Amino acid sequence: MLTISNRIGVYSDTSGIDTFEDCNNREHFLSYKKNISYRYNSRGFRDQEWPDDLSDVVWCVGDSFTVGIGQPFEETWPNILQERIGKRCLNLGEDGCSNDTMTLRIKEIFKLYNPKLIVVMWSYLARRRINGKNVSHDKDDFGNKEDIQNFIKNFKIVNELPITVINTIIPRAYVRTDRLNWFIKKITGNISWVLTPVQQLDWARDHHHFDIKTSKNIVDHICDNIYKL
């Protein structure tokens, strides 16, 4: 779970929907001025190589919004967080990652490294992990009720681990995050668990993912939570 084999050592100028052909707004794509490249490390993540000592790093887990599709690497939220707090932040973002996979990844981190802090940016509720692969939804278990139940199952597993977890969720993953927080508290009975929504303030080159203003806003919220610890 801590290696994405098909990404190891990959280097390219485009990735996912961050291409002229697949982006959501071609005019925006052509007018985007910042240089972007995608370089994946020996574990298959868009990050620098991990340090040998992982005893005091921040683990940033998420999907393509954490990878930073459509953004320069230095403007991804894990990289900005690293600069802000002066502590190595590892980017474990994966394109199309389901919340099921994130949960398995976090459990593996916990098992192997006894982490001090994990920041997870949860993904679309409809995504599932089926037969070892992330899929946009499971046709045999798909619907609003099932999505919420599956998400809260994963949320509960992660937040019951004896580690510090800060929870955020990508823009538009669920229309009303306040309602999702209500479901979390109602189903789990834990009123202290909070899921912080991400408001999209700008657009990356592909005009789907967010850009630097949103990354900085996310880091502000994360740091507010860190300072409360």
Image: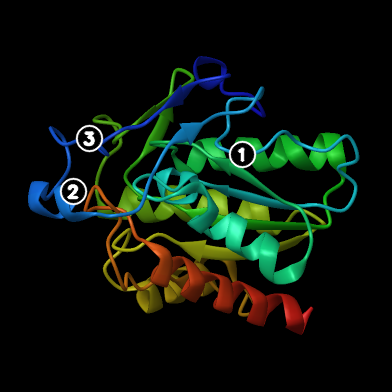
Q: Position of residue 116 (x, y in %)?
A: 84, 57
Q: Which residue is located at x 85 percent, y 40 percent?
A: 113
Please report contact status of discs 2 and 1: CB closer than 8 Å, yes or no: no
Whole-number angstrom distance, CA of label 2 to CA of label 1:
24 Å
* Residue to which mark 3 is pinned: 19
Residue 107 visible, this angle:
yes
Residue 186 visible, this angle:
no
| Quarter occupied by the N terminus | top right
- Classify mark 3: residues with Cα within 10 Å, few (<14), some (14-19) or many (20+): some
As shown in the figure, which amino acid type bears the numbered disc 1?
A: Asp
Q: How is the model colour-coded?
A: rainbow
Q: Looking at the image, is mark 2 or mark 1 nearer the viewer?
A: 2
| Quarter occupied by the C terminus | bottom right
Nearer the observer, 216 or 92: 216
Name the disc covering residue 47, or none. 1
Residue 206 lies, with reference to residue 200, above or below; the image says: above
Left or right: 130 as drawn, with respect to 154? left
Name the disc covering residue 74, or none. none
As shown in the figure, which amino acid type bears the numbered disc 3?
A: Thr
Q: Which residue is located at x 53 percent, y 35 percent?
A: 101
Q: Position of residue 34 (x, y in %)?
A: 35, 53
Q: Earlier in the sequence, mark 2 or mark 3?
A: 3
* Residue to which mark 2 is pinned: 29
Left or right: 146 as drawn, with respect to 60? left
The image quarter in which residue 139 lies = top left
